[in-house]
Each structure stands twice: as C-alpha cells, then as structure tokens.
Amino acid sequence: MSQNKTYYETQSLPLTATIICLGIPLDSVIKSPDGKSIFVFPRSIELDQILENFWKKSLVIEPNTFWEAIRFIKSRIYGGQE
C-alpha cells in the first residue's frame, strides 16, 4: 500500500470501521491484485489524530455504531460500489 499526502490507505477492517465511526468519509475501496480490499480516506489532521489514538488504544466507540460501520464496509466490498 502506498501512502501519499492527500490520501490514507489501509487494509484493516477494524481501523476502517473506527475511522468511519468517527466521521471521516470513506473515499473509495480498491481491490488489490491479490483480491484484498484497500480502504482509502482523505488525509487530514483529524484523521492523523484518530490514527494516533487508535494505535494508542485510547478511543471509545459505541458498539452498535461500530457494527453498523462494519456492515457498511462489507456492503462496499461485496456490493462492488466504489
């Protein structure tokens, strides 16, 4: 996965769900050659703070909101919407 200054890419489903729960819109889903999904977000200071707090394990997400985000992500993966 290549990172650039305007977008952030990840293959992590839990991280993607967390970012969505905290209000950052999912820009796109890219299928890699090996069939895995890469989730793309617009880069921002807010996203960088979320990433830092995610890896520090200092975020709290309401469970139902997290589950809804997982369902949304799976619909993007399997529904083919980009």
Image (cartoon, helix red, strand yellow):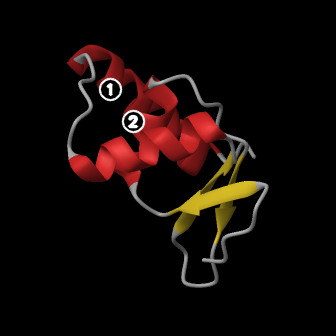
The numbered mark, 1 or 2, whose residue comes first in the sequence reads 2
**SS for dot 1:** helix
Q: Look at the picture and state if 43 lies above or below 11.
A: above
Dot 1 and dot 2 residues touching (CB under 8 Å): yes
The residue pinned by badge 2 equals 18
Q: Which circle marks residue 49 in the picture?
A: none
Coordinates of residue 25 in the picture (x, y in percent): 65, 31
The structure residue drawn at horizontal position 58% and vertical position 34%, both measured from the top left corner, is 46
The type of residue carrying mark 1 is Phe
> Is residue 16 shown to the viewer in this render?
no
Report which quarter residue 47 is drawn in.
Answer: top right
The structure residue drawn at horizontal position 65% and vertical position 68%, both measured from the top left corner, is 31
Coordinates of residue 13 in the picture (x, y in percent): 39, 51
The type of residue carrying mark 2 is Thr
Report which quarter residue 60 is drawn in.
Answer: top left
Label 2 crowd (10 A; few <14 / some 14-19 / many >=20): many
The structure residue drawn at horizontal position 33% and vertical position 42%, both measured from the top left corner, is 53
Q: Which circle marks residue 66 in the picture?
A: 1
Give the residue at the far right of this rendering. Answer: 6
- Looking at the image, which is closer to me, 40 or 47? 47
